[in-house]
Image (cartoon, grey):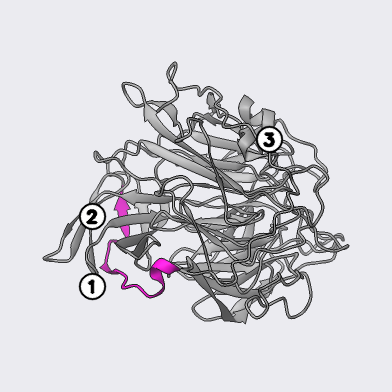
């Protein structure tokens, strides 16, 4: 059932689910999954450690290298960046020259990390790291240098950045003063092709503005027809994808059945756009997003239980020309699909796997986000992670993993590695207590300090011991709408899918560069050749130009979804003229 569309684009009516509030402290014991049968994933400790805490982490295309951003621990602290090479085990920590902590990291079309905003610089007349709050900074992986490319109209600490297909970057949220405001009533648009030009002011759409709160790290997503999804705390909007970003519709706010939970910093949920999949005709006419967790701001303390709910909304293009947007009603009749998670969660990372499942990793069970010298703000870490299968029926989508070995809370990150595993690093509040029942399964920080430098790798169950497809050849460059060939080997029954994923650019529970696109394909089993159709030229919002990783999907592995290959780097370019 669809909500009716009106006008050139749909404006969704507000649909409210069953009205009941969940008390913040309901006395329920936190979930013990220390002996989880049929676990959705397992974890291992890497034999080397980082030199910096991964407040942010960006993967460098065509390598297994990651660049880290850290915070200014105090006014004299200079070590605010680092590098991790998973192939060699070499890690570094250094002063980047620009205070990139607390910025919005994304990746440009050429594969260069870009940091929008940041934090205060070091003290002194010649600081090792200059104030980055008003800067747009580019990192060159070949030289290791950070260069200020442009300026924002106002200082922004905790902003979100969204790269559009034309190279422009929409910068939303953030503030001048950490945890103090002011709250800005406009965003801004930066043009990478004219980097020193003044940015353009962008008014906020009304539904987003009404609920965005402090507007720290809002969730932003580019939709298939280049519209933009804005989510701020308990409500949001969809706008057009070009300046001045005209409002198309306001989203129904979170219903009473979600409870009192807020979703943006410091009550941080993790929010994610699902994998985009084509219809039978190759058009991408549906999209979904899900919010995992959050916190109730009322009288919150380090031991206040976090949210145990997720909220999902599905959309479809509708109308005679499929240019309108309709919300797909849930089985219960409301706009939102509210589900109970296996455990309470905030400060997690949501990683969309090549097979469309979503790995919800890390985070805390209680408290709220932030750093303090007087103990923990999030008092209890999460000992297990979740896997969420969007293809399953509502109420039957969650599975839990084995213990995570290293619990990670505020200022940690997790990324999909080209091996198909989940690489996890960082945490600035990780002198966490041992969860009851996890003795011998969780390894606490051996230094007893808040900073976490150990590195872990998570293996989803569907690739742990399954036969996986192997890509033997694929093009380095593909163009929109073209067909290209991939050679493979696979001992399983059949190739069941082809996917593209973007390199990771993650901070504060939001991967600002995350995108998974399922591609149409045919298989010639006689020659082990797959003919794949690249993202369509008519829908630039499906996959912006730039660096991607190509994956092949194989058979279902028990109850854990389809196995998948290791990734192979590929560049998406515009259609040939």
Q: Is residue 479 above or below residue 355?
A: above
| Gap between marks 1 and 3 measured at Cα | 50 Å
Identify residue for label 2: 484
Mark in front: 1 vs 2: 1
**Residue, disc 1:** 491
Q: Quadrant of the C terminus?
A: top left
Q: Residue furthest top?
A: 7
Q: Residue at the location (83% across, 45% down)? A: 299
Q: Secondary structure at mark 3?
A: loop
SS assignment at label 2: strand
Magenta-tinted stretch: 460-479
**Relative depth, front residue between 186 and 317:** 317
From the image, state whether disc 1 or disc 3 is nearer to you. Answer: 1
Residue 508: image x %, image y %? Answer: 65, 54
Label of residue 212 in the image:
3
Q: Quadrant of residue 144?
A: bottom right
The first of marks 1 and 3 along the sequence is 3
Among numbered discs 1 and 2, the one appearing first in the sequence? 2
Q: Indicate left or right for 386 with 199 as reference.
A: left
Query: Which is nearer the eye, 36 or 362?
Result: 36
The numbered mark, 3 or 2, whose residue comes first in the sequence reads: 3
Q: Are marks 3 and 2 in contact (CB under 8 Å)?
A: no
């Amino acid at each position: 059932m669809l909500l009716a569309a009106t006008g050139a684009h749909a404006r969704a009516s507000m649909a409210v689910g069953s009205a009941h509030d969940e008390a913040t402290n309901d006395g329920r014991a936190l979930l013990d999954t220390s002996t989880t049968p049929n676990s959705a994933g397992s974890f291992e400790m890497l034999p080397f450690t980082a030199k910096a805490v991964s407040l942010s982490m960006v993967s460098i295309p065509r390598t297994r290298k990651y660049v880290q951003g850290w915070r200014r621990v105090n006014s004299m602290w200079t070590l605010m960046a680092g590098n991790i090479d998973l192939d060699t085990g070499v890690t570094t920590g250094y002063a980047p020259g620009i205070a990139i902590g607390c910025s919005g990291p994304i990746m440009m079309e050429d594969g260069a990390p870009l940091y929008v905003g940041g934090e205060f610089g070091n003290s002194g007349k010649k600081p090792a790291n200059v104030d980055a709050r008003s800067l747009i900074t580019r990192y060159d992986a070949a030289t290791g240098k950070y260069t200020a490319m442009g300026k924002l109209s106002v200082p922004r600490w905790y902003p979100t950045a969204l790269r559009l297909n034309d190279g422009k970057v929409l910068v939303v949220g953030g503030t001048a003063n950490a945890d103090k405001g002011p709250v800005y009533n406009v965003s801004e648009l930066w043009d990478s092709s004219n980097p020193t030009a003044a940015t353009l002011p962008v008014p906020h759409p009304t539904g987003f503005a009404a609920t965005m709160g402090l507007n720290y790290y809002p969730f932003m997503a580019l939709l298939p027809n280049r519209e933009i999804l804005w989510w701020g705390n308990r409500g949001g909007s969809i706008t057009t994808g070009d300046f001045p970003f005209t409002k198309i519709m306001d989203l129904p706010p979170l219903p009473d059945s979600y409870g009192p939970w807020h979703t943006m910093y410091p009550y941080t949920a993790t929010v994610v756009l699902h994998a985009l999949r084509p219809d039978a005709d190759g058009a991408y006419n549906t999209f979904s997003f899900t919010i995992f967790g959050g916190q109730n701001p009322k009288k919150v303390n380090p031991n206040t239980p976090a949210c145990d709910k997720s909220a999902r909304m599905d959309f479809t293009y509708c109308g005679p020309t499929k240019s309108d947007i309709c919300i797909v009603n849930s089985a219960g009749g409301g706009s939102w699909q509210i589900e109970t998670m296996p455990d309470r969660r905030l400060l997690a990372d949501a990683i969309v796997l090549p097979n469309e499942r979503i790995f919800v990793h890390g985070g805390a069970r209680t408290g709220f986000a932030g750093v303090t010298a007087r103990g923990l703000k999030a008092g209890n870490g999460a000992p297990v992670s979740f896997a969420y299968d969007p293809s399953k029926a509502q109420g039957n989508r969650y599975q839990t993993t084995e213990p995570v070995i290293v619990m990670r809370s505020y200022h940690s990150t997790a990324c999909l590695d080209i091996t198909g595993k989940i690489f996890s690093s960082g945490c600035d509040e990780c002198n966490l207590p041992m969860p009851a029942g996890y003795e011998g399964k969780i390894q606490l920080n051996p230094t007893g300090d808040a900073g976490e430098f150990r590195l872990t790798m998570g293996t989803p169950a569907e690739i742990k011991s399954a036969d996986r497809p192997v890509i033997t050849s694929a093009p380095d460059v593909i163009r929109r709408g073209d067909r290209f060939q991939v050679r493979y080997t696979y001992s399983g029954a059949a190739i069941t899918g082809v996917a593209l994923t973007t390199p990771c650019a993650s901070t504060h529970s939001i991967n600002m560069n995350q995108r998974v696109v399922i591609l149409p394909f045919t298989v010639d089993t006689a020659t082990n050749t797959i003919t794949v159709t690249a993202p369509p030229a008519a829908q630039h919002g499906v996959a912006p130009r730039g660096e991607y990783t190509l994956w092949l999907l194989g058979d279902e592995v028990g109850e854990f979804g389809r196995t998948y290959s290791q990734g192979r780097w590929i560049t998406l370019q515009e259609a040939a003229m």
